[in-house]
Amino acid sequence: MTAVIILTLIGVLLGLAIALTVRYFGAPVDPLAEQVAELMPGANCGACGFAGCNDYVQALVSGKAKPGLCPSQSADALQKVCVLLGVASEGRAEKVAVVCCSGTDQYAIRRAFYNGVNDCHSAMLVAGGSKGCVYGCLGLGSCARACPFGAIEMRADHIAVVHPEICVGCGKCVTVCPRRIIKLVPKSAPVHVFCSSPEKAPVKRKVCSAACIGCRKCVKAAGENQMFINGFLASVNYENPPSADIVAVCPPKVLRTEAQPAASAASAAPAAPEAPAATTAP
Amino acid sequence: MIAEYLSLIIGAILVNNFVLSRILGICPFLGVSKKLSTALGMGGAVIFVMTLAGFVTALVHHYVLLPHGLMYLRTIVFILLIAGLVQIVEVLLQRFSPPLYSALGIFLPLITTNCAVLGAAIICADNHYSVIKSTVFCSASAVGFALALLLFASVREKLELARVPRCLEGPAIALLTAGILAMAFTGFSGLGG
């Protein structure tokens, strides 16, 4: 019995001592920092360049950083932060990630079967992965696992698809992708080129039937300086993007408004040869 | 009397150094020893906490636990006391020395579970040291800890510049260095108590 009483007593006394110390000697908590912290997404993704949301808030409050570095903050919350800090809000172009590849199993041939660890980096180590195109999405989902917001879906036909309505443009997937085919683009851009291979058209077509063939039709159809060709790969000028109806001119349907539709929707497309036939591919 | 305390102090600092001969408190020893300045801060915090903890635990041991025959509660009561003390120290540090607070970071709460602090308190209780003797022993032990930490940190700062074989980089070479340092400290055995 004495043991219980003494232990309780010690606990209560210590608790009181801690409470009193905090009450009379506690560091004053900045109410401004608290309010700003509530407007942060709290994902601690580090895209702002600080160690975490709290670190960024400290820098904001002390004036060492500008608001708007956080890509995952909604425009509304950013506005509130600017009001709290008393600084003029600078518009921020919202960005989303785009996986620039159309090579689903249906279009891209596989030169081998990869049976190893379910990770793009591991697959890259084994002769550069199983897809014929060395610029194609490996489809093993390293980016999806790196995404703090769960915005990347790994489809069964081996391609990563970013859901722009969830994506906040933090850019984690961009650095994780071993093929470097994920791009951060302005959210407002209507069309994207879903191919990353700079190779010549015949080389690309051998390994993927959904590749940009560099035909320049989009460049001609678009207004001046809206599309350009880089090597044998068309690119959208995101400073001055073309309108969405330009997608009609693209013969391989690589210039699209969104990611490749799932296999069932495009069943008319030529089926990719199976692995044994593909062994002759370069 | 003076000779007794002197041998106690020398024994705690050098001969039975907490880190290098009793192998207690290894976590902060390896964790906070990358930079001399943070090692200094950590050493200071440990000296402060251990002296305070030694004093308070000895008081509780002599005037609460022993009279009621509650020796078996020793460990849990000591842990409780140390944890509470560290909380208070943390609050005070945050208020009065924010740079030191941010430099110590996670290691200050970790002092709570630092075996060196609990170890010192239990060694005092085991040897039936008086309250004053306990306090002196604990602060001397903490000084020994700080000494080992500072020595190790200065060696590690030099190691940063040294060419270390690749397989030994990082923690491996640190542990080897700690071992060599511990061997050097065995030279003190036979000195004092």
Image (cartoon, coloured by chain):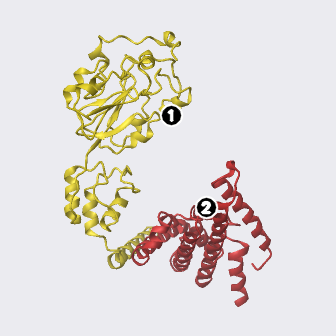
Chain colours: A yellow, B red
Residue A245 falls in which quadrant of the image? top left
Q: Is residue B85 visible?
A: no
Residue beneath disc 1: A121
Q: Residue furthest bottom?
A: B1
Query: What percent of the width, then of the height, locates residue A14?
Result: 41, 73
Which residue is more in the foreground, B170 or B60? Answer: B170
Check residue B30 in the rendering and tell me which mark sits there, or answer none. 2
Q: Are marks 1 and 2 on the same chain?
A: no
Quarter the N terminus of chain A occupies? bottom left
B9 sits left or right of A29 in the view: right
Which residue is more in the foreground, B171 or B145? Answer: B171
Residue at x 55% of width, y 76% of height: B44
B164 sits left or right of A10 in the view: right
Residue at x 37% of width, y 60% of height: A55
Residue A263 falls in which quadrant of the image? top left
Q: Chain of mark 2?
A: B
Q: Chain of mark 1?
A: A
